[in-house]
Image: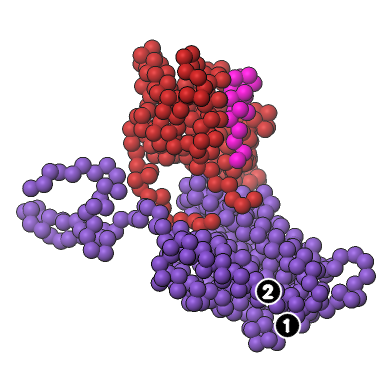
Amino acid sequence: MKIREFAILEHERRKDKMNYKEIAERTIMQLDQNLFLEMKKELTRRYIKFVMIDDDAITPAVLSEKLYDYFTEIESVSGKNFEKLIKTYMDDMDDLIEGRIAKPNKKKGESHAVPRARRYYEHAVWVRKEKMPSLWGLTEYSRIMMCLYMSIIKEHLGIVKDFDFAAQSIDIDSILKSIEFKDNKAKKVRESTKIIAIIMYYQLKNKEITGEY
Amino acid sequence: MPDIVKVTEVGDLTEFLGSKNLLEIVIRNRNGRIKEIQKAALNNFKQDEVKEKLEDAIAILNKNNAIGEQTLQGLGKIQGLSIFNLVLSGVNLCATCAGFVIMHMELQGISNQVEDLVAQNNKIADRAKDFELRGVLAEHQDMLDCRKKQKPYSEEQMRMLVDHEVNVLEMLSDTFLGDITENKKELVFTVLSLATMLATSIRFFDEIYYYNNKENIVGGSNWHGSHPTWMHALERLLQDDFIKKVQDLGYFDMKLDALETDNFYIGFRDQIMNMKIDIEENQRLIEGLESAEVFSAVEKMTVEDVRKTVEAAFNEAGVTPEVRESILNYAVA
């Protein structure tokens, strides 16, 4: 394993418009075959229906096209374009997480160290403020927030001071089940947020580094 | 006059690179006259095929193999890798004199900072007096030198070296887990280096101990009673609290992004796991061979097999002659 001891290339971090077509080309269309099949199953099971096309015929391009129609329809009804739906996704994630991340202790005589989970949460907020809109920023934000939410789920939706930052700790089924059935704070989470979460989850999986063990 | 070119990403500029892959930018003064020409280098954002092949070769050479000093320097120039990257890649610099010279120099350069950190942060003040990083580096160097001269350390000398390295590694680990704010990267590098040294020393000790004592061992383990304690010093580096600190170091101090942090901490974790497995596999090999002479002969054969494997890999991958030569000529110390 090598580490790059220089900063991420600026063109990868540059701000850009969050155009759906570009995002789909760099995420859904780049997925490993097995991951695409998993994502297709996740989306078609709950959110997207194909009436005339057999499952075998649903390719990354077909699925991307269907999602494009979905987001276009939302825009025509709500007035929110894809970029605004990304913002909604980030707002929804923040609503689920912010209140459950422990804050530094303010009592005299006790340590005022910033809890580890809070440190990463604040970095996610910084990424959102300084590095959006960009796919890199969206991916980075999703990684931190999904890991935090997984640890919150393991604490029975309680407050967390620490968390597991490993990408392998994220399980999209657990996240979606919590949002849909268990988390009272999730009642206002839009369906578009869940779909964007699924896209971002598989983007994270596609880039995942697993190591030798 | 050509049309204005619209550039949306750095890659769009590559067609304009001049000699030595430099982009020349004209800076004009207020009158529009050319004030100066600024040369800029673009980051090489495409994965170099030769670098990929070199990485494969390093992976093959890594396994229990030593790499000569000239090879390492050559690799460093070709890949632009720091020593830290080499060690993180699993290149074992601690098994031979030539390799260890480089490690020793690197560690000497940061030993003052590390010793200060340990002294400041060690909760048990007396223990800090026993922390002699430079001492243990000199001992390890001496041990390798004696092996090279065919006058290896005795069992007692090796055991003391292992104990000393365990002590230093434990104190470094304690310091890293404490509330330090500076020089964390240097500290992690030192931890990884000490772990590599310790793993090497344990393997050497196991060989000496087993062949010296196998006739007399009655029941129980074939290995020294302190072996679990020594292994614990390595296993500690795989615990959650340590790994999380390595993640935090990568993400906040080294300003890596999430993927790069993964590369970093997983690389660290994998190297420690490899060290543990190497020790265990070495023990099985020792137990399976009837004498130290046979073991030594098998070790030499393994090195030759690796050389042949690397040559075959180069043939298949079409590695250029100059790259191949710089590695193979000095591949084994």
Mark 2: which amino acid? Glu
Residue B91 seen = no
The location of residue B324, given as percent across then percent down, is 45, 70
Q: Mark 1 falls on what kind of element? A: loop
- The numbered disc on residue B153 is 1
**From what the image shows, is residue B144 above or below residue A68?**
below
Q: CA distance from mark 2 to mark 1?
A: 18 Å
Structural crowding at the residue carrying mark 2, measured as other residues with C-alpha within 10 Å and reported as few (<14), some (14–19) or many (≥20)? some
> x, y percentage for residue A28?
45, 32
For image coordinates 69% across by 52% down, the residue present is B239
B95 falls in the magenta region: no
What x and y, as percent, mark residue B154?
Answer: 76, 82
Say whether residue B41 is visible. yes
Q: What shade has chain A been given?
A: red
Note whether B280 is above or below B245 in the view shown. Answer: below
Region in magenta: A168-185
- At mark 2, the secondary structure is helix
Residue drawn at the location 73% of the way across and 70% of the way down: B202
Q: Which residue is mark 2?
A: B299
Disc 2 is attached to a residue of which chain?
Answer: B
Between disc 2 and disc 1, the foreground one is 2
